[in-house]
Every structure is written in structure tokens, then in C-alpha cells.
Image: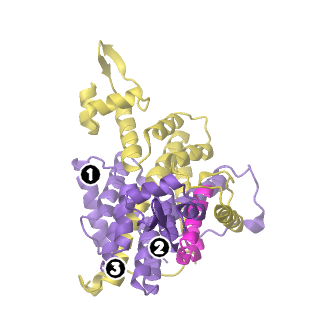
Chain colours: A yellow, B purple
Amino acid sequence: MRIAELSARTGVAIPTIKYYLREGLLEPGVARAANQADYSEHHVQRLRLVRALVDVGGVPIAAAREVVAALGRTDLPPHDLLGVAHEAVAPARHPDRSSADWQRARSAVDDLADRRGWRVNPDSHGMNMLADVLMALSTLEVPEVLADLDVYADTAQRLATIEVDHVIARGDPTRMLELVVLGTVLGESLFAALRLLAHEHASADRLAPETRPQPAAEQPRISRGPATS
Amino acid sequence: MRIAELSARTGVAIPTIKYYLREGLLEPGVARAANQADYSEHHVQRLRLVRALVDVGGVPIAAAREVVAALGRTDLPPHDLLGVAHEAVAPARHPDRSSADWQRARSAVDDLADRRGWRVNPDSHGMNMLADVLMALSTLEVPEVLADLDVYADTAQRLATIEVDHVIARGDPTRMLELVVLGTVLGESLFAALRLLAHEHASADRLAPETRPQPAAEQPRISRGPATS
């Protein structure tokens, strides 16, 4: 197909497609005539992937290029590819990590990982990112969230285990890699969106019960205990 | 205290403090002499809050200003303030929402909210953000994540309920508002960091069991059932 059809099929404007081609996010089409190239279903699929990463996952262009390049590397074990996906979603922002407060928070993270028997690289993005959040929570005096740290960790662990098992169930290495990347990037956006809605509902339910009375039959059954049984 | 001490106490550089003052993220200090102002503990706390929002939560400066302004408004009910916090964390990126694919995804979101009896505004950021993700997941053929939508929703709902109850337990309206905002922004970063680590652990556990054998005594007990009991 011509670039106009590729654009119509994916809803991505032609100048944007040309930008992705220049940036190496999309492989060139097969040259057909001067200034004309032929694109395939592969391009449609890849373009959808790039849009999902950039528009939905909020992944910067440079990181999206890394992800796309990693997807082509069937030699990379899925566990290593996870690192690439994590780099893509981990925020580029870096709070000051030299303070004594931060070091204390980082020790708490190491303790948490030890306590849970987590096999994680001490240099993982997640370790420092978690220390950033713990430091902020402790200097801002938000003890409630810190007290629930293990509830959050249990929850994260349950979701991650389900997700990794889905990856393994795919069998075919190329399709496994794809799910690792998409699951990491889009799974985070998915959960963030659900969290916003769940917060809004819980807030309406507890703090503004008078605004719209809810019929008893529609009451959601919320399990309120800690995440592990 | 002088600006130099405020900087030393918070680890925020003086030019950055001046920038926050100009941008209205920090109230001016009390003028003491020409070119000198006096800052208080209130400024220390506010500066920590701004840093947490911007550096840890990844909130843009303009959105952080909205959050800070909302924190001062004790007239705003906590449920409305939640909207301000959500605006701050909701990503500014907007995929194309005119396509038939997107409309289908949005219908699925409306169905989910109905099915769960969620009291949410149809125009909430979360609704459209969730449709963005569902559309991406369906065009990219990631049926595994879609199949688990209710597991994710259950999980989000359980965490949100715990969090909202913490807010209510604070009693004092000003402190409630603070937790709504901080909980929304920092809670998201916290869970994202834990997810990265849990993924890494689950991946190591399932896909690379030979790299570092784990002593049996340290095996984490993972509850693998669906999130609700």
C-alpha cells in the first residue's frame, strides 16, 4: 500500500509517519518508483505499536525507538527485554539522591526486597524510584501510605505474577517479547486509569453519599481486607 | 530563616526556589530588608510538597500550581479536590479519539463502570484514559490483558477504598485534602515502582530460575487467585 493508505488505515497523519521513518521507529517501505514506497501489514502493526507506546503509554520517542529495536532482537532473553521495557516506562526525572533522607529511604527499599525474597537487581530503576517515593512520603508526613507498603507490594506481586504467566503461556519467543513490552507499558497506563476511576467511585461512595443515591442492588461488593489471604 | 537556609534545609537550589516564587508555587517570604525575606517552616513544608509533586510524581509545573492552589482552598469538598489531583496526574497526551475503534473502546469502559456500579462522572479523565488503553490493547491484539480487566479493576478498587478510608480517618479537613492530593500523585508513583520490581522478580522466578537459586525459606508466598475473595 502507499503511504496515504497506511495513514488512512492507522489514523496517523502522513507527516507523522515520515517523522517516524526518519527517526527509525518504522522500517522504510519497499521502493517502487521515485518518491514512492510500498508499505505492508507489518507497517500497519508497527505503526499501531508506536502510537500505543507514545500516545497511550507516554513513552518518549527515543525510548520508543529502543523498545522497537529490542522487539526485533529474538536473541534477547525475555528477562533482559523486561529491562528495556522498564527503562522506557521509568520516568526520566531524578530527585536529589545524595541526601541522608534518601539513603534512609533506599535502605528501607532494600529491606523490603529482602523481606519479600524479591530477586531484583539492586541497580534496577524500580529500586531507586521506590526510594524516591518513600523519601517524599516520609518528609511529607504521609504515614498512612507507608503503613500499607506491604499491601501495595502484595498487590503488585499478584498482578505481576499473572502477567508473567501470560507471557510464558504464549510460547512463541517473538510473541512473548511483544507481550512483555506491551504489558509493561500499557499495563501501567491501564492500572493508572482504573485507579483514577476507583478513587472517584470510593470518594463519591464515602464522602458524597447524598449526591446520587445508589440503589441497593447496585452496591459493589468491595473486599476491604489486606490483599493477601 | 533566609533563603540560603531554606535551600539548605530542603536541598532545593536557590535559583529553583526563586523560580517557584515567580511561578506562584511558593508564597513570598516576609520582607525584612531590601532584597531579603524571611521564610518559615511553612515554606520548608511547601517546598518539599512541590518537589515531591514535580520530581517524584512527574507533575508539570502548571499542574503543580493548580494542586498547591487547591490545597489552600478549605472551601472545596475533598471529592472535588480529587478532580484537581486527577487532572495533575492524568497525562496530557491525547490519542485520536474520533475513530470507530476508540468509540467501541469507550463503550466497553461505560459497560465496565455500569457493571461495577461505579459512581463516576462520564467526562472523567479516567474514563477516556481507560478507553485509550483498551483501544491500544485491542488493535495490538493483546487479549490477555483485556481478559483480566476485572482482576485489575478489583485490585484498583481495593486499594482506592483503603486510601479513601485513610483520608476520612484524618478528620481535619485541611489534612484530608493534603492526603487526597499526595495519595493520588505519590500513590501512583509508589505502585508503579513496586510493579517494576514485582515484574522483575516474577520474571526472574519463572524465566531465569538458574541465575540465582533462591533458598526455600525465602520463597515468597504468592496468592495467585483473582483479586477478590
Mark 1 sits on what residue? B102
Label 3 environment density (alpha carbons within 10 Å; few <14, some 14–19, many ≥20): few
Task: Residue at 23% x, 82% y: name it.
Answer: A212
Where residue B198 sits: x, y (%)?
A: 59, 60
Q: Is residue B126 left or right of residue A75?
A: left
Query: Between residues B109 and B97, which one lies in front from this camera angle?
Result: B97
Disc 2 is placed on an element classified as helix
Mark 1: amino acid: Trp
* Of the pair A54 and A29, the residue shown nearer to us: A54
Which of label 2 and label 1 is nearer to you? 2
At which x and y percent is residue B16?
Answer: 49, 54
Q: Which residue is mark 3?
A: B74
Q: CA distance from mark 2 to mark 1?
A: 28 Å
Residue holding disc 2: B159
Q: How many marks?
A: 3
Which subunit holds the residue at mark 3?
A: B
User: Could you tell me which chain the residue with mark 2 belongs to?
Assistant: B
Q: Which residues are magenta?
A: A127-154
The quadrant holding residue B105 is: bottom left
Residue type beneath disc 2: Leu
Q: Earlier in the sequence, mark 3 or mark 1?
A: 3
Residue A76 seen by the camera: yes
- Amino acid at pointer 3: Thr
The chain carrying label 1 is B
Residues packed near mark 2 inside 10 Å, few (<14), some (14 to 19) or many (20 plus): many
Q: Earlier in the sequence, mark 2 or mark 3?
A: 3
B208 in magenta: no
Q: Is residue B220 left or right of residue B110?
A: right
